Image (cartoon, rainbow, N blue to C red):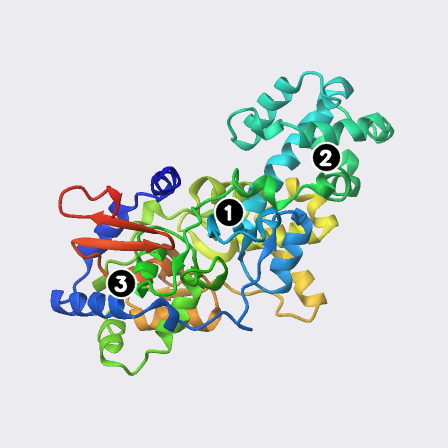
């Protein structure tokens, strides 16, 4: 019961978002109830398997660099993390530690990059481990982190090794964090990701500290309504599927996969009825003009990633001018360019967002890929079907709503928003997490989730 209570407490309370979306929808209640009832009868086992039929898992003792390489190689945003020490366990709670994704990696990289630079600028005594508290305070200020955890172990040890080896003195490292990083140049990248102890930093060490959402697998006999609620109302980006009575992940359902599935429902009456409506009839965009988070093209790319981190979002529109003319898009997935390109990583503190986008375009051009993927937009009078088609065909996670000749950003529609359009939460919802049954009572207290 203790494990159950702990898991329940981690389920995010997203009632305000979901209830607002539901209240704005201009759909017949009978249609909404029929769809919700239908999804409740569809078993999770009927959902298509991941490409190749096998879920990519990353062992907990995998290095961060290797984990990024695996994600990039398979063109996926996230993967379950398995525990090698519990390979023989029949309990999924022991076999799996969570999910690693680009969001977790970026938090780790940004924090340690800035902390290492601050430590280097503080001098050999601090770098070697003396005065670590001061480094922690400076580092926390630099990245907006709190508490001493950010500087414990890795940063101090890595910088200490560099200083002890005479590297800092040889490079003439001086007075501040930026000049410290610049003084090392490509060597800063080397010491951050290729030398000890960073070289051996594993997924296990960051999976809990930098996780955005809880790890909540469902059983194959759970309903698709459960999955859709987790991916929309409860803000999960992915839902692992575990076969009843077995501890192995059999499928991995993402928000993107659900949108792809919805796109294939064209021609069915229930889908066409909803898809033909303008997005405004479905309460979208959810955020007002002033609530849309943007980044200007002349701001630092570091600020863009920090803004994503602080707001727990996966992408930002890049804008110019007072009217917010959209000129590009940066996503959390772009962190792979920093990690896989030493030249880019060593200078990223001084890269503007536009510089960063231009650099990515050049890298893509050199590798034979499309140089620049333009921001995906649609007009405010677009239908939901238009949005779904774009999200599915372009394999993107958000569509920006624009108005006027200059394509000024006025809103954003995400995968989560679209999924929310097709369901509503019954008065009493039974969410079955593998091994647990969570009953959501909407009638009296919308925020209580209880073990049933």
Q: Is residue 113 above or below residue 368?
A: above
Check if mark 2's residue and mark 1's residue have beta carbons within 8 Å: no
Q: Provide the secondary structure element on which disc 1 rests.
A: helix
Residue 320 appears in the rendering: no
Q: Which residue is mark 1?
A: 94
Q: Position of residue 270 (x, y in %)?
A: 23, 76
Q: Quadrant of residue 391?
A: bottom left
> Which residue of the protein is positioned furthest toward the bottom in this rendering?
267
**In the rendered image of this protein, does residue 236 appear above or below residue 30?**
above
- Looking at the rendered image, the quarter that the N terminus falls into is top left
Q: CA distance from mark 2 to mark 3?
A: 47 Å
Q: Between disc 2 and disc 1, whose residue precedes?
A: 1
- The secondary structure type at the circle numbered 2 is helix
Mark 2, Cα crowd under 10 Å, few <14 / some 14-19 / many 20+, is: many
User: Can residue 303 be seen?
Assistant: yes
Question: Is there a contact, CB below 8 Å, between mark 3 and mark 1?
Answer: no
Question: Residue under circle 3?
Answer: 421
Residue 181 marker? 2
In the figure, is residue 274 to the left or right of 255?
left
Q: From the top left corner, tell me how far across and down residue 206 is, in percent.
A: 58, 41
Query: Could you tell me which residue is drawn at 74 percent across and 32 percent down?
Result: 158
* Mark 3 vs mark 1: in front: 1
Judge the density around disc 3: few (<14), some (14-19), many (≥20) Cα neighbours within 10 Å: many
Task: Name the residue nearer the viewer: 325 or 313.
Answer: 313
The quarter holding residue 240 reads bottom left
3D distance between C-alphas at marks 2 and 1: 40 Å
Q: Looking at the image, is mark 2 or mark 1 nearer the viewer? A: 1
Mark toward the start of the polypeptide (2 vs 3): 2
Q: Nearer the viewer, residue 301 or 64?
A: 64
Of mark 3 and mark 1, the one earlier in the sequence is 1
Q: Kindly identify the residue that appears in the image at 72 percent across and 42 percent down.
A: 200
């Amino acid at each position: 019961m203790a494990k159950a209570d702990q898991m329940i407490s981690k389920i995010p309370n997203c009632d305000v978002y979901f209830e607002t979306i539901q209240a704005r929808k201009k759909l017949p209640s009978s249609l909404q109830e029929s769809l919700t009832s239908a999804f409740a009868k569809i078993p999770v086992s009927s959902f298509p398997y991941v490409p190749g039929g096998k879920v990519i898992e990353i062992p907990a003792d995998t290095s961060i660099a290797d984990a990024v390489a695996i994600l990039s190689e398979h063109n996926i945003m996230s993967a379950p993390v398995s525990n090698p020490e519990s390979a023989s366990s029949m309990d999924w709670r022991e076999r799996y530690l969570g999910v690693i994704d680009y969001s977790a990696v970026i938090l780790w990289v940004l924090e340690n990059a800035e902390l290492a630079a601050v430590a280097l600028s503080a001098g050999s005594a601090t770098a070697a481990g003396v005065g670590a508290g001061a480094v922690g305070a400076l580092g926390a200020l630099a990245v907006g982190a709190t508490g001493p955890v950010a500087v414990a172990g890795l940063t101090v040890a890595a910088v200490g090794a560099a200083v002890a080896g005479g590297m800092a003195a040889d490079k003439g490292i001086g007075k501040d964090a930026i000049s410290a990083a610049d003084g090392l140049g490509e060597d800063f990248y080397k010491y951050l990701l290729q030398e000890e102890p960073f070289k051996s930093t594993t997924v296990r060490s960051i999976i809990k500290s930098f996780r955005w959402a809880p790890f909540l697998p469902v059983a194959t006999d759970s309903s698709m309504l459960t999955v859709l609620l987790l991916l929309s109302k409860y803000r999960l980006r992915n839902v692992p599927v575990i076969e009843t009575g077995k501890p192995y992940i059999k499928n991995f359902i993402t928000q993107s996969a659900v949108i792809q599935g919805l796109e294939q429902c064209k021609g069915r009456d229930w889908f066409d009825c909803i898809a033909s409506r303008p997005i405004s009839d479905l309460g979208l965009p959810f955020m007002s003009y002033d609530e849309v988070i943007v980044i200007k093209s002349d701001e630092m790319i570091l600020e863009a990633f920090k803004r994503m981190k602080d707001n727990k979002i996966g992408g930002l529109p890049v804008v110019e001018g007072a009217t917010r003319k959209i000129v590009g898009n940066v996503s959390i997935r772009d962190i792979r360019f920093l990690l896989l390109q030493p030249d880019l990583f060593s200078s990223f503190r001084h890269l503007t967002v536009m510089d960063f986008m231009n650099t990515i375009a050049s890298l893509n051009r050199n590798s034979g890929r499309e140089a620049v993927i333009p921001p995906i937009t649609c007009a405010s009078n677009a239908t939901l079907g238009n949005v779904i088609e774009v999200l599915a065909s372009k394999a993107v996670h958000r569509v920006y709503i624009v108005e006027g000749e200059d394509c000024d950003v006025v809103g954003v529609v995400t995968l989560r928003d679209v999924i929310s359009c097709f369901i509503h939460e019954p008065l009493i919802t039974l969410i079955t997490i593998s091994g647990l049954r969570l009953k959501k009572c909407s009638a009296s207290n919308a925020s209580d989730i209880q073990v049933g």
